[in-house]
Amino acid sequence: KAGIEPCGFHTLRHSAIAALIATGAHVKVVQQFARHASVETTIDVYGHLLHPAGSDAVADLGRLIDGS
């Protein structure tokens, strides 16, 4: 009725983890949710979905230095 195509467990799992990443959850939280043995596995599999942390960090550092 909802028009959703049938899908397997791993598709649902991937979608749930991708949705969690989209909320901005810390990668360690995502790792625990996914039950990966290490955060490296999470980054290897889902790294392309993670927000590039460096861009915000550099901007935050600039604001800290100039007092804004």
Image (cartoon, rainbow, N blue to C red):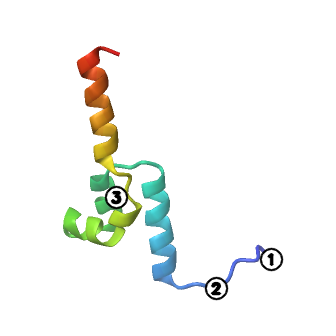
Q: Which residue is mark 2?
A: 6
Check the image and name the residue furthest to the right: 1
- Amino acid carrying mark 2 in the image: Pro
Q: Is residue 65 left or right of residue 21?
A: left
Q: Crowding near pointer 1: few (<14 within 10 Å), some, many (20+)? A: few
Mark in the foreground, 1 or 3: 3
Seen at 35% across and 61% down, the residue is 33
Label located before the other in sequence (2 or 3): 2
Q: Secondary structure at mark 3?
A: helix
Picture coordinates of residue 66, whole percent (x, y): 28, 17
Seen at 34% across and 39% down, the residue is 56
Q: Crowding near pointer 2: few (<14 within 10 Å), some, many (20+)? A: few
Q: Which mark is residue 30?
A: 3
Viewer-closest of 7 and 66: 66
| Cα distance between the residues tagged 1 and 3 | 31 Å
Label located before the other in sequence (1 or 3): 1
Q: Is residue 19 left or right of residue 29?
A: right
Q: Which residue is mark 1?
A: 1
Q: Secondary structure at mark 1?
A: loop
